């Protein structure tokens, strides 16, 4: 199978090191405050003007920062200044999210903004899914990258994922075990491949681009077909020695008797997953087939019986959230869940249950937030592992070449397109 090592590909695994973290601090300051003057970068980071000047020059040469036209209103009288901002044109992170029914492909810029997103169904077999990703990816890049360089490929999914080995250890709903994702896709795409669980990846994205409190302590709860969580403190997502941190799928719910495929009753995932909700709505005649998007459409059209189903689920999720808040006591908990994203008027039901069951959280509206990425959550999750690597070690990039001519970009796109044939 041909590799995606065409001229659009870049690398975050080779290059110069940044042992003191100064380049990352400068990039972080511009991410937070940009467009911003170099003098203000110095104030935000505590670095000297000479260090800021050297680091910004390096980051510009790497294509991570760009200079904007000089402003007429300088920060100091008589000293015009050239503001710096994140360069969102030169590089993109590519991501693939593997869900139970679909594969979502995404391209995301250095500010976490989704440039392109496409989803395709898959049949579930691990070997075939990886082959499908390898075949679909070049065409997706050719359609949407527009001459930008790819920083790498992030691959995320639910279940038990080992980021260090790049392996999906276990995904119960897909029936996968010990799938060597990084090895296979690195060989077939020619890109650096980062692999993680989607809850942890979205936690990384929230730390980079979300509420500033997330950098101090964060819990992220993902409620989809898979239910899992992530925990982060001091800007670091916790994996655990076995890469199993965040497995909440089989926490017991006291008043639930729903049978779980694990053999027990009352597991969180068996009670509140999207699949369970859609199948219940189908059995009750609310929708024509067990499809969450049909259910959401009915809810947005005002079907009160369907809205009641989402309210019931949010109330159960509220109890799970209350438990996580009491055990971990984070500064912020981010929830990625369909109703929280698409039916925000139902959030009071969630907050009411959190307040009723939590011993430590007396203001859930301030502590518990829906994900900021909305309908693009899967694409952002898939790309977040790549973006995190760049923002933590920006000088690991090879220096970016000068922008290619229009003819060269056309050749690159055409070559990439042929790889998908």
Image: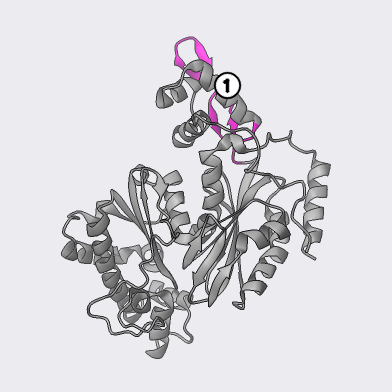
Query: Residue at (52%, 55%) from the top-left corner?
Result: 380
Q: Is residue 275 visible?
A: yes
* Secondary structure found at label 1: helix
Q: Which residues are magenta?
A: 62-88
Q: Quadrant of residue 370?
A: bottom left
Front-lying residue, 188 or 215: 188
Q: Is residue 223 visible?
A: no
Q: Residue furthest top?
A: 78
Picture quarter with the N terminus: bottom right
In the picture provided, is 304 more to the left or to the right than 202? left
Q: Is residue 276 above or below residue 159?
A: below
Residue at the spot of label 1: 54
Query: Residue at (63%, 38%) from the top-left corner?
Result: 397
Where residue 151 sits: x, y (%)? 63, 46
Q: Is residue 216 above or below residue 223?
A: above
Where residue 105 sits: x, y (%)? 60, 61
Query: Residue at (48%, 79%) from the top-left corner?
Result: 291
In the picture provided, is 385 more to the left or to the right than 362? right
Count of marks placed on residues: 1
Residue 350 part of the magenta segment: no
Query: Residue at (51%, 46%) from the top-left corner?
Result: 388
Where residue 24 sits: x, y (%)? 50, 34
Q: Quadrant of residue 46?
A: top left
């Amino acid at each position: 199978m041909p590799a995606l090592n065409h001229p659009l590909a870049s690398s975050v695994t080779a290059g110069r090191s940044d042992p003191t973290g100064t380049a990352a601090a400068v990039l972080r300051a511009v991410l937070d405050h940009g467009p911003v003057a170099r003098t203000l970068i110095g104030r935000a980071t505590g670095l000297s003007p000479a260090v800021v000047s050297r680091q910004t020059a390096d980051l510009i040469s790497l294509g991570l920062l760009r200079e904007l036209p000089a402003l007429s209103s300088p920060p100091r009288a008589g000293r015009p200044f050239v503001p710096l901002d994140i360069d969102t044109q030169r590089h993109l992170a590519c991501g693939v999210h593997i869900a139970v029914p679909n594969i979502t492909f995404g391209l995301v810029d250095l500010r976490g903004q989704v440039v392109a997103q496409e989803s395709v169904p898959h049949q579930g077999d691990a070997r075939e899914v990886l082959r499908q990703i390898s075949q679909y990816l070049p065409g997706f890049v050719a359609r949407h990258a527009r001459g930008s360089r790819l920083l790498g490929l992030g691959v995320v999914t639910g279940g038990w994922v080992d980021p260090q080995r790049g392996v999906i250890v276990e995904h119960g709903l897909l029936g996968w075990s010990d799938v060597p994702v990084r090895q296979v896709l690195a060989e077939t795409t020619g890109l650096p491949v980062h692999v993680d669980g989607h809850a942890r990846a979205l936690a990384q994205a929230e730390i980079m681009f979300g509420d500033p409190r997330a950098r101090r302590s964060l819990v992220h709860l993902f409620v989809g077909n898979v239910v899992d969580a992530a925990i982060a403190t001091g800007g670091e997502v916790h994996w655990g020695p076995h890469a199993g941190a965040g497995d909440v799928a089989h926490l017991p719910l006291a008043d639930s008797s729903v049978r779980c495929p694990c053999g027990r009753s009352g597991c969180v995932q068996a009670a509140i997953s999207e699949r369970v909700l859609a199948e219940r709505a189908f059995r009750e005649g609310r929708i024509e087939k067990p499809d969450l998007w049909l259910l959401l459409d009915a809810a947005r059209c005002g079907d009160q019986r369907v809205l009641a189903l989402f309210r019931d689920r949010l109330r159960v999720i509220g109890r799970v959230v209350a438990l996580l808040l009491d055990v971990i006591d984070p500064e912020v908990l981010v929830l990625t869940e369909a109703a929280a994203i698409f039916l925000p008027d139902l959030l009071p039901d969630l907050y009411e249950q959190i307040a009723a069951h939590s011993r430590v959280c007396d203001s859930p509206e301030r502590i518990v937030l829906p994900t900021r990425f909305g309908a693009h959550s899967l694409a952002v999750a898939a790309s977040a592992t790549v973006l995190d690597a760049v923002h933590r070690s920006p000088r690991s990039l090879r220096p970016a070449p000068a922008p290619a001519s229009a003819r060269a970009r056309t050749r690159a796109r055409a070559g990439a397109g042929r790889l998908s044939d």
